[in-house]
Image: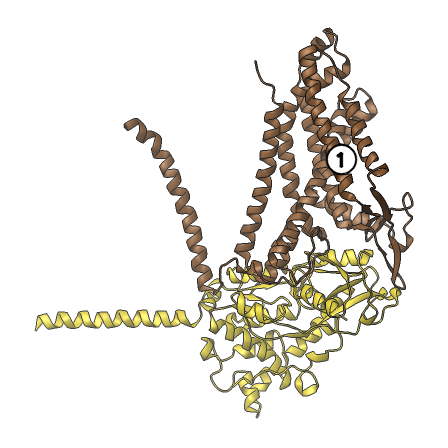
Chain colours: A brown, B yellow
Amino acid sequence: MNFKLKDLGPQLITVIAVVLVFGFFTYNAQVNMESRGIDFGYGFLSQESSFDVQFSLIEYDGSHSYFRAYLVGLLNTILVSVIGIILATILGVIVGIARLSPNYLINKFAAFYVEFFRNIPLLLQIFFWYFAALRALPLPQDAEPMLGIFFLTIKGLYVPAFIWQNFNIFFYSILAAIIAIIVIRIHAKKLQETQGKQTPVLLISIGLILILPLLSFLIGGVGLSFEVPVLKQLATTSFIYEGGVSLPPELIALALSLSLYTATFIAECVRAGIQGVGKGQKEAAASIGLTPNQVLKLVVMPQALRIIIPPTTNQYLNLTKNSSLAAAIAYPDLVLVFAGTALMQTGKAIEIVSITMFTYLSLSISISILMNWYNKKIAITEK
Amino acid sequence: MFKYLKQLTSFVAMVAVLFVFSTETMAAKKSKTLKNTQKKGFVRCGVSQGLPGFSNADAAGNWTGVDVDVCRAVAAAVLGDANKVKFTPLSAKERFTALTSGEIDILSRNTTWTLSRDADIGLTFVGVNFYDGQGFMVRKSSGITSVDQFKNGISACTNIGTTTELNMRDFFNSRGISYEPVAFEKADEVVAAYDAGRCDTYTTDKSGLAAQRTKMKNPDEHIVLPETISKEPLGPVVRQGDSVWEDIVRWSLNTMIEAEEYGITSSNADSMKTSDNPQIKRLVGAEGEMGAAFGLDNEWNLRIIKQVGNYGESYKRNIADTGILPDRGPNELWTKGGILYVPPSR
């Protein structure tokens, strides 16, 4: 009995303290808002927002609701985070490996990159890339086409739009290829475990993912044409491109600076991971006749990933949260659209900030759960 | 006998306590904000992060502008010194929260008076110190001279968190023009992006356009189009719930405008005390009890005029002489063809 009380006592005190602190702040906020005549409520979410947003993944204009505006901001945040995470991972892995390169030039260049980009505040880098890009990029009328169809201008990157015929057949062919690859992989693994036979899974996979969609074009009736952007004059010196898809320079600058910055940290994670695998492991693997490729794939990487994944998860979370700096350069993310314009127009500061905080929390936890699942999956099962 | 005496004393004591409490609560009812301000010794004033002519700090940190002068007038009235103001620069996004949360007591930050702001969010607008309207700036080289020449696909740079975003939508929608809004959090970035060529037009209040134009790399390359697409009455704002403080701010502004109407300036204010016109005498504290209702002395308005000047002086010093908007337009007195008209101080 005594033992239990000693155990429960501190916990109980903690719970009471937390409840009291939260209760105090909630009560205080309520009293203050009451005395200042501010209503509390989430009813505004269904009202008409009456402001437009520059760039949106879903159909939206000012006649939609504030909730729709929230979704627009959220999707834009997710978009820039996903692009940033992919680019940062690719760049981070390359630079991380380059830092271990015996080639003096590559090695030092990678080291310089890491030290340079991780030691300058991110906001400055965002401003730099945005305004440097704005200064350096040509006006639409002066832009030289890249490969004849891309136009990189001060008003954004214009790329041709894909116009599909029978897109669903193409989609199914990709899906079929992916399923086939999974089946082959499982089969190959079984084959190796039972008979020790090696199957060239990678080659077969590449072949499948190329051939099946190609077949859909040849016999499935899938057609693809491009809508190339065309220059249009608005006034004597002002032009835009019409048709095609345009990516605003804000998105490009933000994705670029986020990934350049975060890649430095990921590079260090990768380097730490690879260096964390004992030299003896590689030598032992080589001594039983594994090729260098097999050493990397079967011995080094599985052990290195164990070290790489957890800190890299942190970097993914940081990148997602850092994307809120978008407000500085007019990229319409969650903070700019919802915690900015919508907050201003409605004056619902507590409601909107709480929703925004909860949204970032959910995003971060989702990434965290996903990465933890992956980490568990690749963890070495001790025998 | 002794027994009654005891009762009597307790009764007197009770009355005395009640009296003390009631005067105490009456004084508190008068204006909590005024009492706090006098206790602190400075007026807490929210201003912009730098808009020439309205509220702008120089290198030494001295704030000037017509919005700044409203706060200085209140300081002169309630504290006797126009310099006893603590300025807090605020973004458009932060401004109302700063006021409702009690971080500042006056928001004088080129803020448009609208129904929803006045009614919804615990604020009260006390008057108009600048009649403005939203306009567009374009590059001269574009050849655009009127908003009628705007075409589908035009990109417009602006600030978030302002009425500008809403007016812009109304304007383009009513004309059936598709546009790309590029909205930044701070005005400096808007100017930089527009100047670099990111946008075809820059839209905000016309006074703001005129002020920001002076910050461009080459101001002569840009023009403000003649059309005005909205009404933007800008004025100081206070928290809801302190009607005396609200009155003090309102009448500090009114005093400045009315002083101009009667030709009272910072240099002649003292001599106006002996004027024959009772209206002028009331404005310089020489007749009537014009401060009592606010809990102020009688010369509060004289101090405003002496230390800050009348509205015309403030406009000239901050907006006309700096070359932002030499022409007063609607911000001229009603007697001279403008729409500045304030209720009489009497």
Location of the C terminus of chain A by quadrant is top right
Q: Residue A44 placed where, x, y %?
A: 55, 60
Q: Residue A192 placed where, x, y %?
A: 70, 14
Is the residue B25 above or below the residue A231 in the image? below
Please give left or right for residue A365 compared with residue A205 in the image.
left
Q: Toward which corner of the image does residue A175 lie, by quadrant? A: top right
10 Å crowding of disc 1: few (<14), some (14-19), many (20+): many
Residue B265 visible in the snapshot = yes
Q: Residue furthest left?
A: B1
Location of the N terminus of chain A by quadrant is top left
Is the residue B296 above or below the residue B150 in the image? below
Please give left or right for residue A313 compared with residue B18 in the image.
right
Query: Disc 1 sits on a residue from what chain?
Result: A
Please give left or right for residue A319 compared with residue B279 in the image.
right
Q: Which residue is mark 1?
A: A174
Judge by depth and name the residue closer to the eye, B29 or B314.
Answer: B29
Judge by depth and name the residue closer to the eye, B309 or A177.
Answer: A177
Residue at the image position 81 percent from the left and 46 percent from the top: A164
Please give left or right for residue A170 compared with residue B249 in the image.
right
Q: Residue A347 placed where, x, y %?
A: 56, 61
Across the whole image, how many numbered discs are drawn on residues?
1
Amino acid beneath label 1? Ile
Q: Residue furthest bottom?
A: B276
Residue at the image position 61 percent from the left and 25 percent from the top: A377
Residue B89 visible in the snapshot = no
Q: Residue A291 placed where, x, y %?
A: 77, 12
Residue at the image position 60 percent from the left and 67 percent from the top: B108
Q: Toward which corner of the image does residue B257 lie, by quadrant? A: bottom right
Is label 1 in a helix, a strand or a loop?
A: helix
Q: Toward which corner of the image does residue B110 lie, by quadrant? A: bottom right
Judge by depth and name the residue closer to the eye, A99 or A212.
Answer: A212
Residue at the image position 85 percent from the left and 71 percent from the top: B145
